[in-house]
Amino acid sequence: MRNKITSVIAALGTAAIMSATANAGTLDDVKKRGALRCVVSTGIAGFAYPDKSGVWKGFDVDFCRATAAAVLGDAKKIKAVTSTGKTRFTKLNSGEGDVLWRNTTITFSRDVGVKLRFHGVNYYDGQGFMVNKKLGVKSAKELGGASVCIQTGTTTELNLADYFHEHGMKYEAVAIETNDEARQNYMSGRCDVYTTDASGLAATRSTFPDAQNHVILPEIISKEPLGPATRHGDDQWSDIVTWVYYATVTAEELGVTSANVDKMKSSKNPEILRMLGVEGNQGEELGLSKDWAYQIIKQVGNYGEIFERNIGKSTPIGLARGLNALWTKGGLQYSPPFR
Amino acid sequence: MAVNSETVPGTRNSLTRLWNNQQARSVIIQIVTVTIVFALLALILRNVVNNLEAIGKEFSFKFLLSPAAYDITFSPFIEYTSRSTHLRAAVVGILNTLLVAACGIVLATVMGFLMGILRLSRNWLVNRMVYCFLEFTRNVPVLLHILFLHGIIVTQLNPPRQAMNFADSFFLSNRGFYIPQPVWEPIGWIIAVVFLISVTFVFFFRRWAKKVQDETGRVYPVFWISAGVIVGATAVAFFATGTPLSWSIPELRGFNFKGGLAIKPEFIALWLALSYYTSCFIAEIVRAGILAVSYGQTEAAGALGLTRNRTLQLIVIPQAIRVIVPPLASQYLNITKNSSLAIAIGYMDVVATVGGITLMQTGKEMETMIIVLLTYLVISLVISGFMNWFNKKTALVER
Amino acid sequence: MAEVTRTYKVGQHPDLPPPRSEVGVIGWVKYNLLSTPFNVIMTLLALWFLWSIIPPLFEWAVLDSVWTAESRKACWAKMEVPEGAACWAFIKDRIGLYIYGFYPAELRWRVNLSFVLLVLAIVSVLYENMPGRKFGLWYAVAFPFITGWLLVGGLGLTHVETDQFGGIMLTFIIGITGISFSLPIGILLALGRRSTLPVIRILCVLIIEFIRGVPLIALLFIASTMLNYFLPPGTAFDLLLRVLIMVTLFQSAYIAEVIRGGLQGIPNGQYEAADSLGLTYAKSHLLIILPQALKISIPGIVNTFIGLFKDTTLVLIIGMLDPLGVGRASLADAVWAGLAREVYIFVAIFFFICCFGMSRYSLWLEKRLSTEN
């Protein structure tokens, strides 16, 4: 009996010692720890995956690195906190992660109901359909009665239900937890259609031995703005995450790349000088070092570089910029000015 | 208890005296325990309330009444559309869990007994093969079995257009096994009632026949009379009401088969994987149970001239059952609990619906997990209750 | 042929060898495979089954498989049919990840050392004839703490955060912690369940039955997301620690039932004898009852442990990367994606080797215990 009591007391004691204050300034915590904890996925092609030596790579991970470069001056000082779709928000809210860069759609209920703060859209996605060319389907409206594979735990199944309900079509939903299972189901003909974000479709298609036999239908049935999130109640930290993202976009817009960023320090454009910390003290106002944006671009690159390196045309995933082109090139990526 | 109760005579004060009184001591220990437990519970409850308040979440089950907005295709018992409520989605999930657990229990028991007996087979090859299968299956996580089997079913069976066709009414494809579905006209309930009445009659008849046999030794052909009554009465009712039955035959239209009853591959994969995984443990239990029956019993049966099958049926298994039932109960619990892995292959059980998509959508961790936990607890209690009852019943046979 | 007729005196006839058809290979086949028509059919069926399974599987997994390649495409290019055989190059490429998870490469010697220490601990627990076994046992008790320090760091070693743990190492950590800490808790719960004090008995029954009645994934989910709600605001502790606590509790309930079985197997005379010697509850249990009860429960404990070891794969549901989780994460690398089968088979083989070894041990122990009695 006494042993049991002691063990309970011991457990409580451990809990008390281990307690970390989740509400203190995240920036100070990160600086003290010397590492940034990013909530990332357990594996989404192109967005977050471990390479063979266990280093995390991908579009989301690069933005995490950019944040680390800005805050700590070293893009390597990140810790990937892996999470499934179900556990991602808890990981952020419980303080296990400092920021969420995890392919997360911004929605009303997540912003308001789950109590998150979102900071811009670093990837505009939309839900699409992929079918085998053999079926001869040209439009999603011809899919009545089909079997549809979806990845569960995302917004996709809700969009799908809404879309088919709206068009009065029946379908068989095959909800699968992981992309590999969904891929297997689709390839073997268990489903006629595979639906997920268009980026995910392209990534999955790139792994088929007969990729040319599959088409992505023209309909995009939803808006999936993917962006980073932080906890409520830490405005300084929110600002940092927001402007890390804007810095990458602005850098691309102004033609600053990781290759020419040193030269750009002597540019004639005052905005570049302000951003790179040559003029003004924007970095200090954020609570960061003067050269925070310089570090981002030097170590990770601008938005275009991050895009091309992870999911662009030259990668196996091979996505076009599309909506994610700069606003000057017909896309939606638009950053407020550094002024 | 663990507290040192040695005292030097003469120096004992009232407290140690109290402690050394066994009754008083047990009362003290119990009071302390109750206090600690309740204090802990109160602490947890207070924390929950505080924490929920801090992040502005409300503890309520109101979300259950709002539309679920997602589809569940496999809902064999009740109607469900994406406009139904979360509550309905939860019920669908619970029913699907019950379905796969019940089917799994039946099949695992059958396969387990079969393999347990095959393990005792004199045929060396069969014996070894079953042994290898058992050892391989038992030592690999059940999640992998589910994924494997699902992979095999989905990739090895043909898509619907090239489905295996049995007499134009049964189709086996990787979209499932499609079978004709009986469609009853409204008057069909009469047949059901007649069927139930005849089953009740047979039940009492058998009891009566057994009593007669015990008292007088007269033996009725119980099996034939029972079968005759059930089949005969039902058939009479069926024709008397003018054969109110038609069949909905599955037929390939568009992307999929329409009509008929579809048994989905996700269900089949989960059901079979859970069954064969658990049956391996049951086989070992059965083998141990049979081996626990002293060999003298078999020899005695042999001396009476019973065949090997009759010996097994009448002498060995009834005695082995007593050893088998208690561990069997925990295997049944395991099937139920392991069915929670359904989501890995897309079978919509309670964890996948209310504990998965609903949770994701509403962010109500606390409420949805309570529903999930209660579901499993109730199922577990019912199964253990039933098995305890069965155990008592079989144990009573021992005289 | 000339027949030689001989006569023997009564009792002098030499023993003849049994007929050729009853001994040796033929006799064995006849007796074991073809004794009855039913047996003949079973044998034929079994042979057909083996013939249709083994050769294609062997071809896929061994003969045609590719062991060195840079990517999935390179792998498939080396095969006659793309996807027609196993691409083990994928597993080989990532073997470090499968074993060590994300543990920093330059510190992996600490994991290796832990594996060595683990082997030593296992040896000192399992081999009764080892010289100095008493020290060995104390070492085994200290082992989880030593390894904990070695892996996490601190006190002179570089600190490694537990979210870097993964792969086979994580499986072992969860498994070993589960077994070492659940044993004492399980014993307490089992004793509590047999206690004469109603409050304690009911409490223990409630704990045991609750834990046994719900699936592990639900408990893990509670550990990962809901435990925060149960703790005072602002406290949050390490996810791995939370999972370890949950797994230990889960395991304890099962161990408690096994040990309860063992306790029930102890004849009442033992209790009465201990009482008549005037031993206290603690002493009679520590010295008389538990040593006997534990001994007969060991096979059951090992079997429970095998179950737990297999269940560790479920941590991937809350985002921890065990071997299966590492495999799935690796499948997200576009260079390799699509080779799920290889991952599953590799992980299955790993679990099979570990669990089969343990089940052999438990069987051997069972045999030895039964001959001892």
Image (spheres, rainbow, N blue to C red):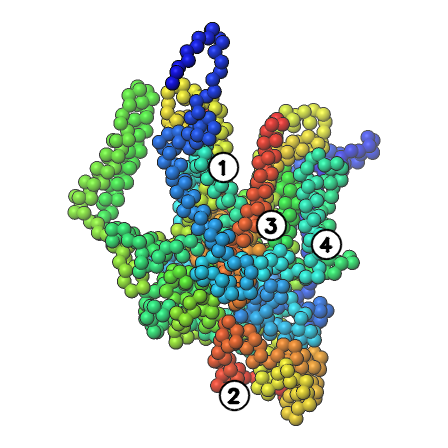
Badge number at residue A328? 2
Name which residue type carries label 2. Answer: Thr
Q: Nearer the viewer, mark 3 or mark 1?
A: 1
Label 3 – label 1 distance at C-alpha: 26 Å
The residue sitting at 47% across, 42% down in the picture is: B133
Vertical relation: B244 (above or below) C75: above
From the image, which quarter does the C terminus of chain B lie in?
Answer: top left
- The answer as to whether the residues below labels 4 and 2 share one chain is no
Amino acid type of the residue tagged 1 in the rendering: Glu
Q: Amino acid at mark 4?
A: Leu
In front here: B55 or B331?
Answer: B331
Reply above or below: C155 against B128. below
Label annotation for residue C150: 4
- Closest to the observer, C367 or C31: C31
Q: Is residue B276 visible?
A: yes
The amino acid at mark 3 is Val
Q: Using the numbered discs, state the Cα–Cα distance from disc 2 to disc 1 in whole angstroms.
A: 71 Å
- The Cα–Cα distance between marks 4 and 1, rounded to whole angstroms, is 40 Å
Residue found at the very far bottom of the displayed protein: A268
Query: Foreground mark, 3 or 4?
Result: 4
Kindly state the secondary structure of the residue where label 1 is placed: helix
Residue indicated by mark 1? B284
Q: Nearer the viewer, residue C35 or B386?
A: C35
